[in-house]
Image (spheres, helix red, strand yellow):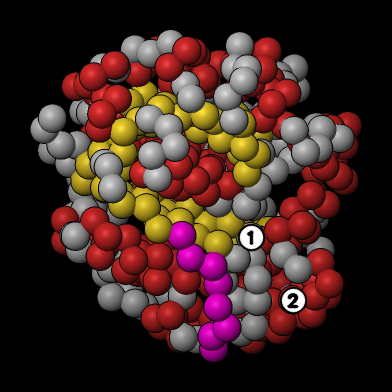
Amino acid sequence: MTDVFIAGIGMTHLGKFTERSVKGLTAEAVGLALGDAGGQLEDIQAAWFSNTRQGLLEGQNAIRGQCALRPLGFEGIPITNVENACASGATALLQAVAHIKAGLCEVALVVGAEKMFFPDKREAMFKAFMGGTDVYRLEEFRRTSAATAEQLIPPELRGVDTGQRSFFMDSYAAQARLHMQTFGTTQRQLAAVAAKNHWHSTMNPLSQYQQDMSIEEVLAARLVSWPFTLPMCAPISDGAAAAVICSASALHRFERRRALRIRGISQVSGRTRADDDFANHLGRHAALQVFEQAQLDASDIDLVEVHDATCYAEIQQVENLGLCPIGEGGLFTEQGHTKLGGRVPVNPSGGLVSKGHPVGATGIIQLCELASQLRGEAGARQVENARIGVAENGGGFYENEEAATLVTVLERAPL
């Protein structure tokens, strides 16, 4: 079983780009990754392509990766399309890693590209989110979410139409309220997560948003789904990222000093559990699996990127990763431990809520941030002496948790 390395990685700016296409975003990200690796197109022996929206919004079904990569010169090699909701990018990486470990190739390309913003297809943009849960049980899940810890919602805000939003915001809001009811987590602590990430994003030139926000400003913003206001929720985003990964035997072909070891990667699916059984959340199982695989524990982690589709998700994943006890994620954040300069910086990139969330690309984008940090190239947001970075990428929603979660450990190691 060979070690696998990220030899090169790159991402586009994130935002809402009416004139950009999946093909154009892909070309930019692939060029950046190959340039970062010091590699050539001819080095790539297999490719994985992650996308979730092009079939729904543009009618490009089935062969999205072939259509995006062939114009760049990728011909003849196996190209595999991956769709696993918001966890698609990390899932594509796992498949490529497995391919290399199996000895089927030495060098692979992993790409995530997403075009989500179509102002003339606004209804379709939001309808696309529905496919991230069981459509046969959608109304059941909606009723359950609305009823979860409903008594915490201020009476004047119950049943209020706050405008168009995704099913996921209501699902995460229900889980946030349950956490508040069980552990005493406060809306202010949730806002502290968002405020921190919006501040972090001011130091990330590739972020969709780069505006600092105070806790009070976050709380005063437009309500989406109580307890969430707009700055607590990830936006609709366009963007792409790509990574060149290789076996140890192929590392000499690339900029060896810039390589990062993939020390571990795990994938789990959700399971039936009681709503308040937080210790058995799938994110906790994914973390424990990867810790065993990588032979480390939470105390070894220098920074993390987690899937904060909402600010509550960050609190939940901080607990799942063992950075603090279950139930204390809100307090841990409020005390500043997850902020740059704190005990374990979380989402120094700005996270999904501010950096952006182009669904199929997010899992790879998280690794772009870890790579910058572990190489000491993150500028003003640099985490001092970063050696071990962890990314958690979740996708879909089924009953009371995500449908899929992956956790990846990257290491800056002497070669």
Q: How many marks?
A: 2
Foreground mark, 2 or 1, reads 1
**Which label belongs to residue 270?**
none
Q: Are marks 2 and 1 in contact (CB under 8 Å)?
A: no
> Closer to the N terminus: mark 2 or mark 1?
2
Write the start and end of the magenta stretch as one range.
Answer: 267-274
Residue on which disc 2 sits:
141
Circle 2: residue type: Phe
Q: Is residue 266 left or right of residue 382?
A: right
Q: Which residue is mark 1?
A: 396
In the rendered image, residue 205, in percent from the top left (x then y), is placed at: 43, 23
Tell me if residue 24 can be seen.
Answer: no
- Answer with left or right where residue 409 lies relative to residue 308: left
From the viewer's side, name the closer residue of 223 and 2. Answer: 2
Most common SS among magenta residues = loop
15 is higher (above) or lower (below) than 324: above
> Vertically, is 291 above or below 55?
below
Question: Distance between the Cα atoms at labels 2 and 1?
Answer: 13 Å
Give the vertical position of 141 relative to 99 (above or below): below
> Residue at horizontal 79%, vertical 80%?
140
Indicate yes or no whether the magenta region holds residue 268: yes
Residue 85 place in picture, x, y as percent: 64, 52
Rendered residue at 79%/49% (across/down): 128
